[in-house]
Amino acid sequence: MQRQLFSQYQQVVAIGGGHGLGRVLSSLAFLGDRLTGIVATTDNGGSTGRLRNSNDCIAWGDLRNCLSQLAHKPSVGSLLFEYRFDSQDELCGHNLGNLILTALDQLCVRPLEAINLIRGLLKIDTRLYPMSEHPTHLLALDASGSKVFGELEVDSMAERPVAMSLEPMVRATEEAVAALTAAELIILSPGSFLTSLMPPLLLPELATAIKSSQARVVFIDNLKPEASVAGELSLNAKLDWCQQLIGPGRIDAVLCHGQPYQDELIYRSLLADPIQSGCHDRDALVNALVQALQPKKLIA
């Protein structure tokens, strides 16, 4: 019944990276090709970071995570895509999905073509666009004026940054801009706030598309504070960061985990998955979105 209430939305776009965005997309996968994910591509750690260093490519890890969460399971394709090598050689720690995407990227004209090939293999209807098809890194400025380069390093900062940008500044994926322009609902997904949600919003073309669109915008907060410098940010601070980029008054509703309660634009409900610790419950997330998608209000 709750799913039927989404029938009014022909274009839903969720933005973020890694586990949080993947969870949102898998919760709304019943929308099929009416759902689009715009994924951060600035990760520089683990298997993804090693591949970036050797191939000068975009970060594939968050895209792979979203593809994995959207894949029909169990299947041979999904198992292969999530396989991680534990051998005592140069493959140790590499994820097979990352290697496949990197190989396809070298065979294709565009990274987006590699993603679409995997979507076809895994029978995924949801559209996935990298925030950019050009390599870039996250750059933060601390209170002393020092620059901190790279996602891993930003997460390890002793104090929260005063400003963030991308280095180099790259162009957003055209399809991602078009999806936001046509969107009727835009979801700012949970996850690492500074290193998953911020990177796409730091692209002026994406931020401008959100700012000028007629879509409802919903921000989904994390279940608990992050174990990084972003954990120091209050909910209001996160909203301020977002609205500095996408414009004041663009966030229509905020979903938080907690005892059911509504205060202006804040919708609190029990969103934690009782089985998978640290994850949003898919059904609860859909129900909370339905509750929040009421007549539009604005954050001043």
Image: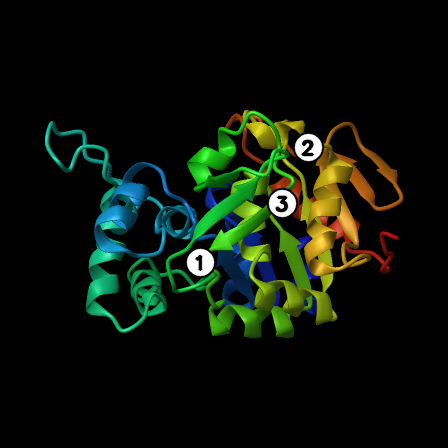
Which of 23 and 163 lies nearest the eye of the viewer? 163
Residue beneath label 1, please? 168
The dot on residue 233 is 2
In the picture shown, does residue 70 fall above or below 83? Answer: below
Indicate which disc, 2 or 1, sits on the residue closer to the N terminus: 1
Give amino acid for label 3. Ala
Give amino acid for label 2. Leu
Element on which disc 3 rests: strand
Element on which disc 1 rests: loop
Q: CA distance from mark 2 to mark 3?
A: 14 Å
Residue beneath label 3, please? 163
Quadrant in the rendering for residue 297: bottom right
Percent x, y of residue 134: 38, 63
Percent x, y of residue 274: 57, 26
Element on which disc 2 rests: loop
**Does the image show residue 97?**
no
The dot on residue 250 is none
Going by the image, does 128 lie left or right of 78? right
